[in-house]
Image (cartoon, coloured by chain):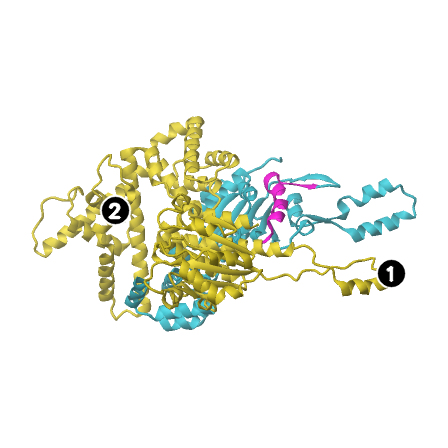
Chain colours: A yellow, B cyan
Amino acid sequence: MTDLHPERAAGEAMTELLAGFIQELRQAGLPVSLTENLDAMEAVKHIPLEDREAFKYALAATLVKNNTHWRAFETVFEVYFSLRGSQFRMGDGGDDALAQLLEELEQQEEMQGDGPRNGSGGGESLTPEEIAEMLYKALQRGDDALMRAVARQAVRRFAGMEPGRPVGGTYYLYRTLRNLDLDAVLEKLMNQARQDSPEALSPLEERLEHDEYQSRIDQLKKEIEGEIRRALVADRGVEAMARTLRKPLPEDVDFMHASREEMASLRKAIYPLTRKLAVRLARKRRHGRKGPLDFRNTVRHSLSYGGVPAEPKFKYPRPTKPEIFVIADISGSVASFARFTLHLVYAISGQFSKVRAFVFIDGLDEVTRLFEGIDDIAEAVHRVNTEADVVWVDGHSDYGHAFEVFWQRYGKEISSKTTVMILGDARNNYHASQAWVLKEIEKRARHLYWLNPEPKSYWDTGDSIVGEYANHCDGTFECRNLRQLEKFVDYLA
Amino acid sequence: MPDQTYRFESVAEVREGLRNVDYLSDEGIAGIVYLADRLGKPILVEGPAGTGKTQLAKSVAEMSGARLIRLQCYEGLDESKALFEWNYKKQLLRIQAERGEGNAWEQIEDDIFSDEFLLTRPLLEAITADDPVVLLIDEVDRVEVETEALLLEILSDYQVSIPELGTIVAKQIPLVFLTSNNTRELSEALKRRCLFLHVDYPDLEREKEIVLTKVPDITDSLADQVARIVRSIRQLELKKAPSVSETIDWARTLLLLGIEHVDAETAKATINILLKYQSDITKAVRELDQEHGTIQKASAGK
C-alpha cells in the first residue's frame, strides 16, 4: 500500500501508469477510444487507490463497454497491477488459518495414535497427503482465506515452476490440478455429506450439496490460477506475461479450437448476429424495385382520363420469403466447427420461417425436422448427431458424393428465392469433387456462399479443393471466428 | 454547464443509501453510481432480464429524493415522443384568434413558437426540471440504431437543440440511467458516452439477502433453500433462467403456502413461478427428479 502514496502525490505517475495499462488493453484487442481514456483518468481521481476492487470497477466502467470483454480486461488488469497493488502481499490471515488448521490436524492424528510428526507448520514442507487433507477441510468449510492459502501451497508443491522456463500458465495449472484430483475430492465431500445427514439425502438435496461444493471448487481453481499468474509475473515481469496470458476476445476465438467455456460465450453471441442476418435479408426484399406493368389496373385507371392510359400502374413484386438452405459438414476434421455450425443453423432457423438444414460426411441427410419443435438447442444437436444418416461408406468426408446426393434428392427444390450456404473445409480425401453440382446450384439459386473454417493459407493445400468449388460460388469466406462471421453478414447487406 | 454539487460523499454512502431503500447493491454497482455522480456521466446498465436494472434507477431516485422521469423505449420511438413536440392545435387556435386583430405575421410567428406551445417529452422534461431528477431511459436496445442518435446530444452535453427556440441547456445535471437487455449491439457513439455496468444474477449470499429483505416474514433457512435451488436451476441450459424478481415471487408463494422445507415435490409443484417456458419447466422437473449420479453420467456421455 505504501508504494501507492507517492504515485498519488504525483498525478503524472498515475497518468503514465494508466497510459501503459490502456496500451496493454489495446494490444489485447479491446477497443479503447481517446474519450474513454480521458474518462478513466478522471474516474480514478475520485476513487481511493488503496481500494483495489473499486479501482478495478472504476477502470472497467470507463474502459470496457462490452461484457464479453470483461475476462480479457480482468486478465490484463491482474497482470498489469499484480506487482503494484496490495493484493500481491495478500493473505497473511490465510497463513494464520492454515497454521491453525495444521495444528488441529496434528492433534487429531496424535489422538489417533499416529505419533507426532517432525515439524511442519511452516507450510514449506507439506506432504501431498497433508495438502490433500487441508484442501478437503477448506472446501468443506468454504473458508475463503483458507482456500487461498491452500491454493498457494498447492501451487508451490505441485506446479513445479521453474524460473525462466517459457511455458504458459495453463501448463502449470494443469499440473497442479492433476495432482489435486478435484473430482475425487468432490466425491469424498459428497460421501461425507451423505453420512453427516441424519436421514438419506433426497435427490434434490444431493444436487444442492453437489452444486455448493462445485462452486467452491470453481473458486479454488480461480485462486490457483491467480496464484500461478502472480508467480509468473514475479518471475518474468509484467510486459512479457501480459503478452503470454492474453486471452483472445470472444469475437477472435477460433471456432476450431474453442474451449467449452469459450463455446458457451460464443453461443450467446450468435443470437444477436442471426437477428442481424435476418434483418439484412429482410431489408433486401423490402427494397425491391417496381415490378412489370399491371395492365388491368392501368386500364381501369384510364377510364377517368377518358380511356387514355395517362397513369400507368405497375405490379409490386410480392415480397418473397427468403429461403435458406444450409449444408454443413459435420465430419471429425471440423468437429468443433460443426458443433458451432449446428448452433448457428438452429439460431438461424429461429429467425426465418423457411430454413432447411442438411448435414453430411460422405452421405447426406436433411435435419430440418430434427430442429423443428425443439426448444432446447443441446437436445437438437444431440439428435442430429445420433439420428442423422450421414455415413455412406466409411465416414470420411466425401464432398463429391454428398453433393451428388443433395442434387438428386433436393436439387429441384432450389429456386430463385433460395440462398444456399455451404459450411465446410472442402477436405475431400482425394475423392472426385463433382463440382458440376455447385455449378448447377449456382444457376438455380439466388446466391451460393461457402464458409470455410480453415485459415486462408491452408486452402487448396493437401486434399483441400475449396478453390475448385469456389469457382462456382458467389463468395467464399474464411469463417474462423465471430468477427469473420460478422463480416460475412455485413457483406450480405 | 451549471455548477454541480455532488450527491454522494463516498461509495459506502451510496451502498448504505441503497440498502435503506431495500436495494442490495454490490461493490461494483455502488461504485459506478458514485462515479456517475462525480463524473456527471450517464450509466448504461446491461444484463439479463429481471436482475434489477430498472429497479436500480428507481432506488437511486428514491434514496436521493429525486423525481424519476422514465422514457420507455420501443421500436418506432421518435423525436416527438422522446424530446418535444409543438402543440399544433393550440398554435392553430392562436393563429385564428389573432387573425382578426391585424397583428403582423412576424409577431404571431414569434408567439406560436414559444414555450407556451411546447409539449415537453421525458428527455426535455428531465433537462428543464428545477427539482432534482433521475432520468431512466428503459430498454434502449429496442429503438433502431438511427433513433439512438437522438439521445447523443442529451447524453454528452445535457442539452437539447430545438430549431425554433435554440439550445436548451440543463439547469442541473440529472443522473441518467440507460438499461439494455442486449438484444442488439448498441452503437459505439452511445457506449462511449456512458459508464458501463453489467448486472448479472447475484451470487448465492446476495440473492439470499435479497430474498430476506424483500420477503420480510421468511425464515432464514427457507431463504437459503430458495437461493440454493434457484442457483441450481440457473446452471441448467434454459431458454430463460429465473430472474431475481421471479425468485422473490417464488419465495413469497412458498411463504403463503406455509411451506417450511422445500423438497423435490413442492419444488416441482411451484416451479411454474420460476420458469415461464413449458420446455424449461419440463427440463427442470426432469433434472430435479434425477439422481445426481445419473446426471453426471448423462453429461459425461455427451
Chain letter for mark 2, please: A
> Which numbered marker is on residue B242?
none
Is B36 or B188 nearer to us in this picture?
B188
Residue A385: horizontal and vertical position, in percent?
37, 64
Residue B251 placement: quadrant: bottom left
Secondary structure under the numbered disc 2 in the rendered image: helix
Under mark 1, the amino acid is Tyr
Along the viewing direction, whichever of A441 and A134 lies nearer the viewer: A441
* Relative horizontal placement of residue A213, taking residue A352 as reference (left or right): left
- Counting from the top left corner in percent of width and height, residue A402 is at 41, 61
Q: Is residue B151 magenta?
A: yes
- The residue carrying mark 1 is A305
Q: Main secondary structure of the magenta part?
A: helix
Q: Quadrant of the N terminus of chain B?
A: top right
Q: Is residue A86 magenta?
A: no
Q: Viewer-proximal residue, A356 or B192? A: A356
The answer to whether residue A101 is visible is yes
Bounds of the magenta span?
Answer: B142-161
Residue at image position (8%, 49%) is A116
Front in this rendered view, residue B189 or A124: B189
The chain identifier of the residue carrying mark 1 reads: A
Q: What residue is shown with label 2?
A: A151
Instruction: State which tag comes first along the sequence, 2 or 1.
Output: 2
Can you give x and y, in whole percent of width and height, for residue B243 in the image? 46, 60
